[in-house]
Amino acid sequence: MLNAALAEGRYVTDELKMFHDTARRFMQAEVAPNVVRWDEQGHVDRELWNKAGELGLLCPSIPVEYGGGGGDVAFEKVLIEEQGRAGCSAWGLSLHNGIVAHYILAYGTEEQKQAWLPKLASGEIVGAIAMTEPGTGSDLQSVRTTAIADGDDYVVNGQKVFITNGQQAGLVIVVAKTDPNEKAKGISLVVVETDKVEGFRRGRNLEKVGMHGQDTSELFFENVRIPKANLLGKGEGMGFVQLMEQLPQERLIVAWAAVAAMELALDLTTQYVKDRKAFGKRVIDFQNTRFQLAQARTEATLARVFVERCTEMLIDKKLDVVTAAMAKYWTTDKQFEIADLCLQLHGGYGYMDEYPISRLWRDSRVQRIYGGTNEIMKELIGRFL
Ligand SMILES: Cc1cc2nc3c(=O)[nH]c(=O)nc-3n(C[C@H](O)[C@H](O)[C@H](O)COP(=O)(O)OP(=O)(O)OC[C@H]3O[C@@H](n4cnc5c(N)ncnc54)[C@H](O)[C@@H]3O)c2cc1C
């Protein structure tokens, strides 16, 4: 349906196309058939990470010397799109690959990169990033978790909530105050290797409106001792700057998923309205259906073209905070609107769990909340008007 030329960024190479084929085959064979089961069990199978690691699907945009695939972020994009096409919101792959590994690559010392990146790339450990706390989400400067220096260690205390991959993570990047008297300047990123410490506890795997197969969890840190060598970056107090620097990529990751979900919803719905009959006609024969789908297709195409351009900018290291915020808020708002329209066009069947559109609708809601809420995105854009 989509004119392929609109979606072909100038970053597409033969190597990327081959990787894309591998990603598609893996997602269709290993992911799509398990989506319903993972929703029921509340997490993906732990072996999925190792299987993906064996095929080179973990950390494809991390340099080869650290166990990665040596590609650019377009390799992450095709993975996210194929996961979206497989209808899977359960697997926190994009967070592990595109966010956690990239913090370590960007700010880690050589020893940190050598120690952690190969394990993330093989699936030996799963990554998570813990920013949000029960008392603060959007206002990250107000985090209360502390990492206080004590001899050669930091002692970490605090509570985190809504942490993606929370039940399976073996490496958690924790946003903590090394200086609790400061706001942004007191924040540092410290790495907790969960099986090497005492005092770390996983809380509930939280029950959610959607993304039922994703192990979004509470995490507790009670006098957790980590070596000072686990501070990410060159000195204390750099955490807030590091978070800000990584945000454009994180937001584009959300936008990539939004576009893939919109396209899948429209494909499924177009087929459905061609098959379903009412008043002696196909549902697509009602002008209302055609007009609504024509509009939604146009919007999904606009979203696709915009994120393709943003991808080129990200690869060229030119994606700025404002453009990334625009991409995140607009594509996720549209994803939700289009999922809702598509559910409506399925009638009562759209509300039934056995129809994939119901999952696409449920899962679309949170895209407007995480990765920075869409209100925060508008705040950011507004600041630069
Ligand atoms: C499924 C899921 C997965 C998640 N994964 C992770 C994860 O892996 N790691 C992690 O650290 N966090 C994660 N989060 C947390 C997520 O990033 C936060 O929920 C989000 O940033 C919002 O924070 P909050 O929930 O505290 O809402 P609040 O910050 O309390 O916001 C409440 C409302 O106030 C609005 N608001 C707040 N400030 C302003 C303002 N200045 N101007 C206008 N409106 C404002 C918000 O937009 C929102 O509508 C996840 C959340 C979910 C639901």
Image (tube, grey):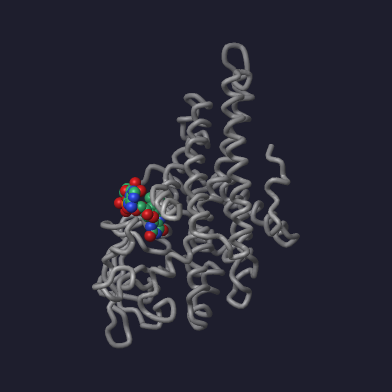
Q: Residue at x 56, y 69 (%)?
A: 122
Residue at the extreme left: 181
Q: Residue at x 58, y 46 (%)?
A: 260
Residue at the extreme right: 14
Residue at the extreme bottom: 151
Task: Please state if 346 lies on the left or on the right of 140 as rendered.
Answer: right
Q: Kindly indicate the quadrant of the structure image that contains residue 157.
A: bottom left
Task: Please state if 325 lies on the left or on the right of 269 as rendered.
Answer: left
Q: Name the image quarter holding the N terminus.
A: top right
How far from the left and from the top, in percent, is residue 143? 29, 64
Which sits in the foreground, 53 or 316? 316
Which sits in the foreground, 25 or 63? 63
How far from the left and from the top, in percent, is residue 9? 68, 54
Tell me, yes or no, if residue 95 can be seen here: yes
Total count of labels: 0
Residue 25, placed above or below residue 146: above
Residue at the extreme front: 385
Q: Residue at x 62, y 30 (%)?
A: 294
Q: Residue at x 56, y 40 (%)?
A: 262
Which sits in the foreground, 306 or 226? 306
Tell me, yes or no, if residue 359 can be seen here: no
How far from the left and from the top, in percent, is residue 142? 28, 63
How far from the left and from the top, in percent, is residue 332? 49, 45
Residue 201, placed above or below residue 224: above
